[in-house]
Amino acid sequence: MDKLGFLDGVARIAVFVSLLLALFLLTVKTENKLANRLFACFIILSAIDFSGLLDYTFPDQYVNLEILRSTVCLLEMPLIYFYVLAVCYSDFRLKWKHLVYTLPFMVMNLVFMPRFYLQSGIVKEQFIANYSRMFEVYFFQVLIELQYWFYIVCIFLILKKYRKIYLENYTNPSTSTYKWLFQMTCVFAIMHCITASKNLLRYTASRDTFLWGNVLMVVMALCVICWFVMKALNHPELFRGINSQLQLTKDFLPKENQTIIVTISNQDEAVSAQILALKNYMKEKEPYLDPSLTIQGLANQFNVPVRDLSILINHHMNQHFFDFVNEYRIQKAMHILKDQSKNQLTVLEILYEVGFNSKSSFNTSFKKYTNLTPTAYRNAS
Protein backbone atom coordinates (compact mmCIF):
# COMPACT_ATOMS: atom_id res chain seq x y z
CA MET A 1 0.00 0.00 0.00
CA ASP A 2 1.39 3.44 -0.97
CA LYS A 3 1.44 6.45 1.36
CA LEU A 4 -1.75 7.98 -0.06
CA GLY A 5 -3.58 4.68 0.30
CA PHE A 6 -2.38 4.25 3.87
CA LEU A 7 -3.39 7.83 4.75
CA ASP A 8 -6.82 7.26 3.20
CA GLY A 9 -7.28 4.08 5.26
CA VAL A 10 -6.29 5.73 8.53
CA ALA A 11 -8.50 8.73 7.80
CA ARG A 12 -11.49 6.48 7.09
CA ILE A 13 -11.00 4.70 10.42
CA ALA A 14 -10.73 8.07 12.20
CA VAL A 15 -13.93 9.34 10.57
CA PHE A 16 -15.83 6.12 11.33
CA VAL A 17 -14.76 5.94 15.00
CA SER A 18 -15.42 9.66 15.51
CA LEU A 19 -18.94 9.43 14.11
CA LEU A 20 -19.64 6.27 16.12
CA LEU A 21 -18.54 7.93 19.35
CA ALA A 22 -20.50 11.07 18.50
CA LEU A 23 -23.64 8.99 17.96
CA PHE A 24 -23.11 7.29 21.30
CA LEU A 25 -22.67 10.62 23.12
CA LEU A 26 -25.84 11.99 21.54
CA THR A 27 -27.92 8.98 22.59
CA VAL A 28 -26.45 7.97 25.97
CA LYS A 29 -28.47 8.94 29.05
CA THR A 30 -26.67 11.41 31.28
CA GLU A 31 -27.46 14.29 33.61
CA ASN A 32 -25.32 16.75 31.69
CA LYS A 33 -26.81 16.42 28.22
CA LEU A 34 -25.53 19.78 27.01
CA ALA A 35 -21.89 18.87 27.67
CA ASN A 36 -22.30 15.56 25.82
CA ARG A 37 -23.97 17.25 22.87
CA LEU A 38 -21.28 19.90 22.62
CA PHE A 39 -18.55 17.29 22.73
CA ALA A 40 -20.40 15.20 20.15
CA CYS A 41 -20.62 18.22 17.84
CA PHE A 42 -16.89 18.78 18.27
CA ILE A 43 -16.21 15.15 17.31
CA ILE A 44 -18.48 15.42 14.26
CA LEU A 45 -16.66 18.55 13.07
CA SER A 46 -13.35 16.76 13.69
CA ALA A 47 -14.60 13.91 11.50
CA ILE A 48 -15.48 16.42 8.77
CA ASP A 49 -11.99 17.86 9.16
CA PHE A 50 -10.43 14.37 8.88
CA SER A 51 -12.49 13.69 5.74
CA GLY A 52 -10.27 16.16 3.90
CA LEU A 53 -7.56 13.50 3.99
CA LEU A 54 -9.72 10.90 2.22
CA ASP A 55 -8.86 9.94 -1.33
CA TYR A 56 -11.83 11.46 -3.13
CA THR A 57 -12.64 14.30 -5.50
CA PHE A 58 -15.63 16.62 -5.26
CA PRO A 59 -17.73 16.85 -8.46
CA ASP A 60 -17.33 20.23 -10.14
CA GLN A 61 -20.80 21.39 -9.09
CA TYR A 62 -19.97 20.72 -5.41
CA VAL A 63 -16.41 22.07 -5.33
CA ASN A 64 -17.52 24.90 -2.99
CA LEU A 65 -18.08 22.27 -0.31
CA GLU A 66 -14.36 21.47 -0.18
CA ILE A 67 -13.44 25.01 0.89
CA LEU A 68 -16.41 25.15 3.25
CA ARG A 69 -15.28 21.83 4.76
CA SER A 70 -11.77 23.16 5.33
CA THR A 71 -13.09 26.12 7.33
CA VAL A 72 -15.21 24.12 9.80
CA CYS A 73 -12.10 23.74 11.98
CA LEU A 74 -12.79 27.34 13.05
CA LEU A 75 -15.89 26.06 14.86
CA GLU A 76 -14.06 23.33 16.80
CA MET A 77 -12.41 25.44 19.52
CA PRO A 78 -15.60 27.43 20.29
CA LEU A 79 -17.33 24.08 20.88
CA ILE A 80 -14.55 22.93 23.22
CA TYR A 81 -14.76 26.28 25.02
CA PHE A 82 -18.52 25.82 25.53
CA TYR A 83 -17.96 22.20 26.51
CA VAL A 84 -15.57 23.27 29.29
CA LEU A 85 -18.12 25.82 30.52
CA ALA A 86 -20.88 23.20 30.47
CA VAL A 87 -18.77 20.70 32.44
CA CYS A 88 -17.55 23.27 34.97
CA TYR A 89 -20.83 25.10 35.52
CA SER A 90 -24.04 23.10 35.94
CA ASP A 91 -26.20 26.13 35.08
CA PHE A 92 -24.45 27.00 31.79
CA ARG A 93 -26.84 27.32 28.85
CA LEU A 94 -26.29 28.24 25.21
CA LYS A 95 -27.79 31.58 24.20
CA TRP A 96 -28.25 33.48 20.97
CA LYS A 97 -25.39 35.80 21.93
CA HIS A 98 -22.99 32.86 21.67
CA LEU A 99 -23.36 32.99 17.89
CA VAL A 100 -20.72 35.70 17.97
CA TYR A 101 -18.17 32.90 18.43
CA THR A 102 -18.86 31.77 14.86
CA LEU A 103 -17.50 35.07 13.47
CA PRO A 104 -14.05 33.67 12.48
CA PHE A 105 -15.80 30.95 10.45
CA MET A 106 -18.04 33.48 8.69
CA VAL A 107 -15.19 35.97 8.14
CA MET A 108 -13.01 33.30 6.57
CA ASN A 109 -15.75 32.28 4.14
CA LEU A 110 -16.30 35.93 3.25
CA VAL A 111 -12.58 36.23 2.51
CA PHE A 112 -12.88 33.26 0.12
CA MET A 113 -15.92 34.81 -1.54
CA PRO A 114 -14.35 37.16 -4.18
CA ARG A 115 -11.68 34.86 -5.61
CA PHE A 116 -13.37 31.51 -5.13
CA TYR A 117 -17.10 31.24 -4.32
CA LEU A 118 -18.10 33.90 -6.88
CA GLN A 119 -15.81 32.64 -9.65
CA SER A 120 -16.37 30.21 -12.52
CA GLY A 121 -15.42 26.53 -12.49
CA ILE A 122 -12.05 26.94 -14.23
CA VAL A 123 -10.94 29.71 -11.86
CA LYS A 124 -11.97 27.56 -8.90
CA GLU A 125 -9.94 24.63 -10.21
CA GLN A 126 -6.88 26.86 -10.56
CA PHE A 127 -7.45 28.21 -7.05
CA ILE A 128 -7.52 24.70 -5.56
CA ALA A 129 -4.51 23.62 -7.64
CA ASN A 130 -2.51 26.51 -6.12
CA TYR A 131 -4.26 26.37 -2.77
CA SER A 132 -1.17 26.39 -0.53
CA ARG A 133 0.20 29.51 -2.27
CA MET A 134 -2.94 31.65 -2.16
CA PHE A 135 -3.14 34.76 0.02
CA GLU A 136 -6.46 33.62 1.47
CA VAL A 137 -4.84 30.43 2.76
CA TYR A 138 -2.06 32.38 4.49
CA PHE A 139 -4.73 34.51 6.16
CA PHE A 140 -6.59 31.30 7.06
CA GLN A 141 -3.52 29.85 8.80
CA VAL A 142 -2.92 33.05 10.78
CA LEU A 143 -6.59 33.19 11.82
CA ILE A 144 -6.48 29.57 13.00
CA GLU A 145 -3.39 30.25 15.15
CA LEU A 146 -4.84 33.40 16.72
CA GLN A 147 -8.18 31.76 17.42
CA TYR A 148 -6.69 28.54 18.79
CA TRP A 149 -4.38 30.15 21.32
CA PHE A 150 -7.05 32.67 22.32
CA TYR A 151 -9.33 29.80 23.36
CA ILE A 152 -6.52 27.86 25.03
CA VAL A 153 -5.76 30.87 27.24
CA CYS A 154 -9.49 31.45 27.95
CA ILE A 155 -9.97 27.82 28.98
CA PHE A 156 -7.01 27.93 31.35
CA LEU A 157 -8.47 31.09 32.94
CA ILE A 158 -11.86 29.39 33.34
CA LEU A 159 -10.23 26.38 34.99
CA LYS A 160 -8.22 28.60 37.33
CA LYS A 161 -11.37 30.33 38.56
CA TYR A 162 -13.32 27.06 38.69
CA ARG A 163 -10.70 25.45 40.93
CA LYS A 164 -10.73 28.38 43.37
CA ILE A 165 -14.53 28.44 43.58
CA TYR A 166 -14.62 24.68 44.04
CA LEU A 167 -12.13 24.75 46.91
CA GLU A 168 -13.99 27.58 48.64
CA ASN A 169 -17.49 26.09 48.35
CA TYR A 170 -17.34 22.29 48.04
CA THR A 171 -15.92 19.39 50.06
CA ASN A 172 -16.17 16.46 47.68
CA PRO A 173 -12.49 15.45 47.72
CA SER A 174 -12.43 14.61 44.05
CA THR A 175 -11.00 17.38 41.86
CA SER A 176 -11.03 15.10 38.83
CA THR A 177 -13.07 17.55 36.73
CA TYR A 178 -10.37 20.20 37.01
CA LYS A 179 -7.53 17.71 36.48
CA TRP A 180 -9.14 16.12 33.46
CA LEU A 181 -10.07 19.38 31.74
CA PHE A 182 -6.59 20.72 32.48
CA GLN A 183 -5.04 17.61 30.93
CA MET A 184 -7.39 17.87 27.96
CA THR A 185 -6.41 21.48 27.32
CA CYS A 186 -2.71 20.66 27.59
CA VAL A 187 -3.15 17.81 25.11
CA PHE A 188 -5.00 20.11 22.73
CA ALA A 189 -2.16 22.63 22.94
CA ILE A 190 0.44 19.94 22.24
CA MET A 191 -1.61 18.48 19.39
CA HIS A 192 -1.99 21.88 17.80
CA CYS A 193 1.75 22.48 17.97
CA ILE A 194 2.26 19.18 16.15
CA THR A 195 -0.39 20.09 13.58
CA ALA A 196 1.13 23.54 13.02
CA SER A 197 4.56 21.93 12.54
CA LYS A 198 3.03 19.47 10.09
CA ASN A 199 1.48 22.33 8.11
CA LEU A 200 4.89 23.98 7.81
CA LEU A 201 6.11 20.83 6.06
CA ARG A 202 3.80 21.80 3.19
CA TYR A 203 6.18 24.64 2.40
CA THR A 204 9.56 23.36 3.62
CA ALA A 205 9.70 19.59 3.10
CA SER A 206 9.01 16.96 0.45
CA ARG A 207 5.49 15.76 -0.35
CA ASP A 208 6.25 12.33 1.14
CA THR A 209 7.28 13.87 4.47
CA PHE A 210 4.14 16.00 4.48
CA LEU A 211 1.96 12.93 3.84
CA TRP A 212 3.54 11.00 6.72
CA GLY A 213 2.99 14.07 8.87
CA ASN A 214 -0.71 13.84 8.02
CA VAL A 215 -0.77 10.15 8.96
CA LEU A 216 0.86 10.86 12.33
CA MET A 217 -1.57 13.72 13.01
CA VAL A 218 -4.68 11.65 12.26
CA VAL A 219 -3.52 8.65 14.32
CA MET A 220 -2.72 10.87 17.30
CA ALA A 221 -6.00 12.77 16.98
CA LEU A 222 -7.93 9.50 16.88
CA CYS A 223 -6.19 8.24 20.01
CA VAL A 224 -6.86 11.52 21.82
CA ILE A 225 -10.57 11.55 20.95
CA CYS A 226 -10.98 7.95 22.13
CA TRP A 227 -9.16 8.80 25.36
CA PHE A 228 -11.33 11.85 26.05
CA VAL A 229 -14.61 10.07 25.46
CA MET A 230 -13.71 6.86 27.29
CA LYS A 231 -12.50 8.83 30.29
CA ALA A 232 -15.71 10.82 30.36
CA LEU A 233 -17.82 7.67 30.20
CA ASN A 234 -15.81 5.88 32.89
CA HIS A 235 -15.84 8.87 35.25
CA PRO A 236 -19.39 10.26 35.49
CA GLU A 237 -18.31 12.53 38.36
CA LEU A 238 -16.60 14.68 35.73
CA PHE A 239 -20.02 16.10 34.90
CA ARG A 240 -20.86 17.44 38.37
CA GLY A 241 -20.55 21.14 37.70
CA ILE A 242 -20.70 24.06 40.09
CA ASN A 243 -23.01 27.07 40.02
CA SER A 244 -21.54 29.87 37.93
CA GLN A 245 -23.19 32.48 40.20
CA LEU A 246 -20.88 31.55 43.08
CA GLN A 247 -18.27 34.19 43.87
CA LEU A 248 -14.78 33.98 45.24
CA THR A 249 -14.43 35.28 48.79
CA LYS A 250 -12.07 38.02 47.59
CA ASP A 251 -14.81 39.31 45.27
CA PHE A 252 -17.03 40.45 48.12
CA LEU A 253 -14.39 41.46 50.65
CA PRO A 254 -13.51 45.14 51.01
CA LYS A 255 -10.69 45.94 48.59
CA GLU A 256 -8.36 47.12 51.31
CA ASN A 257 -8.63 43.78 53.14
CA GLN A 258 -7.84 41.50 50.25
CA THR A 259 -4.09 41.54 50.77
CA ILE A 260 -4.24 41.19 54.55
CA ILE A 261 -3.92 37.74 56.15
CA VAL A 262 -5.60 38.01 59.53
CA THR A 263 -4.28 35.60 62.17
CA ILE A 264 -6.36 34.26 65.06
CA SER A 265 -4.21 36.07 67.62
CA ASN A 266 -5.21 39.53 66.42
CA GLN A 267 -8.83 38.93 65.41
CA ASP A 268 -11.48 40.71 67.40
CA GLU A 269 -13.42 38.81 70.01
CA ALA A 270 -16.50 38.38 67.82
CA VAL A 271 -14.59 36.64 65.05
CA SER A 272 -12.70 34.47 67.55
CA ALA A 273 -16.01 33.46 69.15
CA GLN A 274 -17.45 32.55 65.75
CA ILE A 275 -14.44 30.40 64.92
CA LEU A 276 -14.62 28.63 68.27
CA ALA A 277 -18.35 28.01 67.83
CA LEU A 278 -17.81 26.65 64.33
CA LYS A 279 -15.06 24.29 65.48
CA ASN A 280 -17.22 23.03 68.34
CA TYR A 281 -20.11 22.48 65.92
CA MET A 282 -17.88 20.49 63.57
CA LYS A 283 -16.70 18.25 66.42
CA GLU A 284 -20.12 17.71 68.00
CA LYS A 285 -22.43 17.45 64.96
CA GLU A 286 -19.88 16.04 62.48
CA PRO A 287 -21.51 17.52 59.34
CA TYR A 288 -18.37 16.60 57.39
CA LEU A 289 -19.54 12.97 57.30
CA ASP A 290 -21.83 14.01 54.44
CA PRO A 291 -19.72 13.47 51.28
CA SER A 292 -21.76 16.05 49.35
CA LEU A 293 -21.46 18.81 51.97
CA THR A 294 -21.18 22.31 50.49
CA ILE A 295 -20.59 25.66 52.14
CA GLN A 296 -24.26 26.49 51.51
CA GLY A 297 -25.32 23.31 53.32
CA LEU A 298 -23.05 23.98 56.29
CA ALA A 299 -24.23 27.59 56.49
CA ASN A 300 -27.83 26.38 56.70
CA GLN A 301 -26.96 23.91 59.46
CA PHE A 302 -24.83 26.41 61.39
CA ASN A 303 -27.53 29.05 60.89
CA VAL A 304 -25.34 31.81 59.45
CA PRO A 305 -25.41 33.52 56.03
CA VAL A 306 -23.29 31.63 53.51
CA ARG A 307 -21.37 34.82 52.72
CA ASP A 308 -20.37 35.28 56.38
CA LEU A 309 -19.32 31.63 56.67
CA SER A 310 -17.24 31.88 53.50
CA ILE A 311 -15.42 34.96 54.84
CA LEU A 312 -14.92 33.29 58.21
CA ILE A 313 -13.31 30.15 56.78
CA ASN A 314 -11.63 31.30 53.58
CA HIS A 315 -10.44 34.67 54.90
CA HIS A 316 -10.25 34.81 58.68
CA MET A 317 -9.14 31.20 59.12
CA ASN A 318 -7.03 31.42 55.95
CA GLN A 319 -8.25 28.00 54.73
CA HIS A 320 -10.20 26.82 51.74
CA PHE A 321 -13.54 25.31 52.71
CA PHE A 322 -12.33 22.16 50.93
CA ASP A 323 -9.27 21.86 53.23
CA PHE A 324 -11.19 22.95 56.33
CA VAL A 325 -13.72 20.11 56.07
CA ASN A 326 -11.30 17.45 54.85
CA GLU A 327 -9.09 18.10 57.87
CA TYR A 328 -11.92 16.90 60.12
CA ARG A 329 -12.47 13.89 57.90
CA ILE A 330 -8.80 12.93 58.13
CA GLN A 331 -8.78 13.39 61.92
CA LYS A 332 -11.83 11.11 62.16
CA ALA A 333 -10.13 8.54 59.94
CA MET A 334 -6.95 8.70 62.04
CA HIS A 335 -8.99 8.02 65.18
CA ILE A 336 -10.66 4.99 63.58
CA LEU A 337 -7.36 3.63 62.24
CA LYS A 338 -5.83 3.82 65.73
CA ASP A 339 -8.84 2.16 67.37
CA GLN A 340 -7.94 -1.51 67.84
CA SER A 341 -11.61 -2.42 68.25
CA LYS A 342 -12.20 -1.33 64.64
CA ASN A 343 -9.23 -3.03 63.02
CA GLN A 344 -11.63 -5.28 61.13
CA LEU A 345 -12.74 -2.27 59.05
CA THR A 346 -11.02 -1.96 55.69
CA VAL A 347 -9.56 1.31 54.46
CA LEU A 348 -12.35 1.46 51.88
CA GLU A 349 -15.01 1.17 54.58
CA ILE A 350 -13.31 3.85 56.68
CA LEU A 351 -13.04 6.37 53.87
CA TYR A 352 -16.76 6.06 53.13
CA GLU A 353 -17.56 6.33 56.83
CA VAL A 354 -15.70 9.65 57.24
CA GLY A 355 -17.20 11.36 54.16
CA PHE A 356 -14.86 10.52 51.29
CA ASN A 357 -16.14 8.79 48.15
CA SER A 358 -12.90 7.94 46.36
CA LYS A 359 -9.98 5.81 47.54
CA SER A 360 -7.41 7.76 45.53
CA SER A 361 -8.70 11.09 46.89
CA PHE A 362 -8.69 9.72 50.45
CA ASN A 363 -5.11 8.46 50.12
CA THR A 364 -3.96 11.78 48.66
CA SER A 365 -5.62 13.85 51.40
CA PHE A 366 -4.48 11.48 54.17
CA LYS A 367 -0.87 11.61 53.02
CA LYS A 368 -1.06 15.40 52.79
CA TYR A 369 -1.91 15.65 56.49
CA THR A 370 0.15 12.74 57.89
CA ASN A 371 2.90 12.06 55.33
CA LEU A 372 1.76 8.43 55.53
CA THR A 373 -0.68 6.25 53.65
CA PRO A 374 -3.71 5.05 55.68
CA THR A 375 -2.30 1.49 55.76
CA ALA A 376 1.14 2.67 56.92
CA TYR A 377 -0.47 4.85 59.59
CA ARG A 378 -2.54 1.93 60.89
CA ASN A 379 0.52 -0.33 61.04
CA ALA A 380 2.53 2.34 62.85
CA SER A 381 -0.19 2.88 65.49
Image (tube, rainbow, N blue to C red):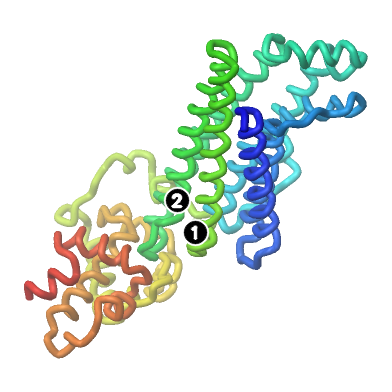
Image quadrant where residue 329 sits: bottom left
Quarter of the image with the C terminus in it: bottom left
- Which kind of residue does numbered mark 2 sit on? Trp
Decide: is 277 above or below 26. below
Decide: is 177 above or below 115. below
Q: What is the x, y in percent for residue 125?
A: 84, 15
| Residue count near mark 1 (Cα–Cα under 10 Å), binned few <14, some 14–19, many ≥20 | many
Decide: is 247 above or below 145. below
Q: Residue at x 47, y 51 (%)?
A: 247
Q: Residue at x 20, y 72 (%)?
A: 331
Say the numbered circle drawn on residue 238: 1
- Which kind of residue does numbered mark 1 sit on? Leu
Decide: is 109 above or below 330. above
* Secondary structure type for disc 2: helix
Q: Nearer the viewer, residue 97 or 123?
A: 123
Say the numbered circle drawn on residue 8: none
Residue underneath mark 2: 180
Are dots 1 and 2 in contact, CB under 8 Å? yes
Q: Residue at x 52, y 35 (%)?
A: 154
Q: CA distance from mark 1 to mark 2?
A: 8 Å
Q: What is the x, y in percent for residue 362?
A: 29, 67
